[in-house]
Image (spheres, coloured by chain):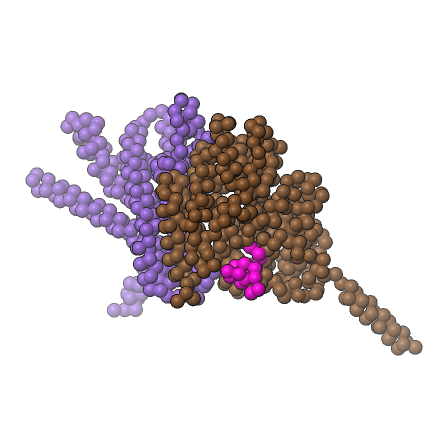
Amino acid sequence: MSTSTSFNRLTPYVFLAPAVVIMALALLYPLGYMIFGSFREWDPSQAMGESTYVGLKNYITLWNDPNFRESTFVTLKFAISVVTVEMFIGVGLALMLDRNLRGMSLLRTLFILPMMIAPVVVGLIWRYMYHPTLGIFNRGLKGVGLESVDWLGQHALLSVIIADIWQWTPFIFILALAALQSLPRSALEASRIDGATGWQQIIYIKLPLMMPVLIVTCLLRLIDAFKVLEVILVMTEGGPGLSTEILALRISRTATEFRELGVAAAMSNYLLMLLLFITVLMLVYNRVMEHRAARASRMIEESD
Amino acid sequence: MFNISKTICGVAVASVLMVGQALAGPYDDYADTTLVVNFPAHPHYDAVRKILPEFTKETGIEVEVDQLPYLKMRERQTLELGQDEGDYDLIAYVVFSKADYVYADQLENLARYFMNPKLSDPAYDADDLIDGYVYNIGFAGGNKGYLQGKTGSLFGIPYGSETSILGYRKDIFEKHGLEVPQTYDQMLDIACKIPELEPGMGGLSSRAASGHHASHAFLLHLAPLGGRVFDDSWNPIVNNAEGVQAANALKTIVDCGPEGASSFGFGEALGSFLAGDTAMFLDTTVVAGQIDDPAKSKVVGKVGWALHPEGTRRGSQTGGFGIGIPKNAENKEAAFLLMQWLTSKKGDKLVALAGGNPSRFSTHEDADVNAKFPHMATFGEALKHADPDWRPIIPVWGKINADLGTTLSKVLTEDLDVQEALDGVAERATAIMEEAGYYTWNK
């Protein structure tokens, strides 16, 4: 083998090297730092070198901490609720608006506006809208003679869920609409010729064909919903009690208020593991579905 | 002849130089220095910025201010103070940072500056500084480790300090013939009478939101009602009769308060009073400026001020900020001169007139200050009862405080039994204190 051949073989790796180095520095180093820190008793006033190695203590403490368990439960409840509702509304809106109407482009732009607003501003807007006396909701309720509602007191989790749905449904909508518009028109034409109704088209043609995109969309939203911080921080600061204290907020408080960086790092790792588990689960599901679809089409081809 | 003249000239020049040196002002050596200071975004420090040009004019020392929201400021300081060479020459810190910074050996002990005759102003009059603030914000290493005492030292000087005061609507009180409450029983009674007398109006607006808001509001009542969080051996006693009474007082206030009071943070509680939705406000003195500002307040001229009501004792809060010199500061001596100037009688009066919170007894009694801010005399009286130990300033307090605040929030919103709630707090606090080593000497 000549030198030039082996050089040619190395060429792709040489070109890849800068990207790999940057990735390693930008992604793996902080991750490694966090994992390393999670095994230490570490105060923000200390350098990492001054902290004490405590093994798995932080992980075990968290496992036995009822507040951490409650936060995890709140996070799951929040993430599952918002993603489920957002998926329904977002996909529903996309199905309704996938047509050529006048002013549609303006409507689409309006729909995605909430997504473009900074989360802190969203939190503030909703906090004022939920204000017991000055807020638009209670003023509206009073205006029609109904009792006012203590939104951020008695119904805090529901209130933050509503705010999140308002902000992030457009994300699902926009991706679902893109998926819909890239569907093969031939399949829809064929179903129409075969006499499929609008509903049948949605259930048997559109949704199955959109599924790979919807799964990735759902995954992205789920990951984001697990990490949401600013809106809840501004609206409720996690209260009343721990009713809206999701994990990201607890991690932030543990690092800044409790000044326990090691415990905060361990908590972040738990969250990371949870997200990895969900990601793998959804990707496996996607792979199984694709495999099943491929097998079905092979069987159809064979029977022909 | 020529040599004699030369000698005479030389001696004359040297004498002039020596006399000049002997007469040099305390600021001359630092005249070209630029100090970088880190202050919070806070009404008091907005006032401080107005008076800094006066300092520069008088001393020739330039001051560059890095002003940050206070939580952000704490984060920045945590990073900065850990460096070998820091960016800041002088920092303002919240009282809880005192425990962290002093424990991590990041703040200068001020003794060597006050001992230095070239730096220390003989007219400074440290005795005029308000005792409770100095003990709360400035001292460490004394009683309980975080207060004044025979083993304590001074690490900072209070600047932008606050205490609690009762604001009440004079017009509403006059209309219904109500007496300004002097005791807790009277205050709670009036707080619940107001919604009956003035439908739609809350009695007293208080912080109550989950976390440090609820905890702060509870502690505000705990000290005057005779309670403490820990006994002298660091055993939690927050669940004793006084603790339960304080939690019940908070619950009564929230129940008789304005609509949605259980989710009020400081901003909402103040907003409610400013909007005229409540008849009383029991919290920090820092709000006085906003209450008198027609752009922010609907109750200008309608608010009277009274001392924080008495329970079994007087005990108003001590809080706010202090200023200290980081160990890694570049211009420590010039920073001390700025610190001394700001907290001097002159500096304190200037900042008070600019709308800040004075830290000296004399400023509260000053005729010019009182002419501009008539409430200042009452505030000065309140400061005599400021309790430096109304909450513990220990490194693990953040965690206990958060637990106390979230548990009390459950009492206010989910009707959790008060005794059960505080017993839980005490139990968890014991575990935290045990882990932090507070019971080592009991073994």
Q: Quadrant of the C terminus of chain A?
A: top left
Q: Nearer the viewer, residue B303 or B344?
A: B303
Q: Nearer the viewer, residue A252 or A197?
A: A252
Q: Residue at x 56, y 43 (%)?
A: B308
Q: Nearer the viewer, residue B147 or B77?
A: B147
Q: Is residue A239 left or right of residue A279?
A: right
A301 lies above or below A146: below
Residue A48 shows in the view: yes
Q: Residue at x 66, y 50 (%)?
A: B361
Picture colour for chain B? brown
Q: Is residue A106 magenta?
A: no
From the top left corner, tell me how far across and down residue A184 is, in percent.
Answer: 23, 35
Q: Is residue A53 left or right of residue B190?
A: left
Check the image and name the residue furthest to the right.
B1
From the top left corner, tell me how far across and down residue B423 is, in percent.
Answer: 37, 50
Residue segment shown in magenta: B135-151
From the top left corner, tell me how far across and down residue B186 is, in percent.
Answer: 52, 37
Q: Residue at x 43, y 62 (%)?
A: B438
From the top left corner, tell me how far across and down residue A28 is, in percent.
Answer: 36, 59
Q: Tell me the purple chain.
A: A
* Snapshot quadrant of residue A59: bottom left
Q: Quadrant of the N terminus of chain A?
A: bottom left
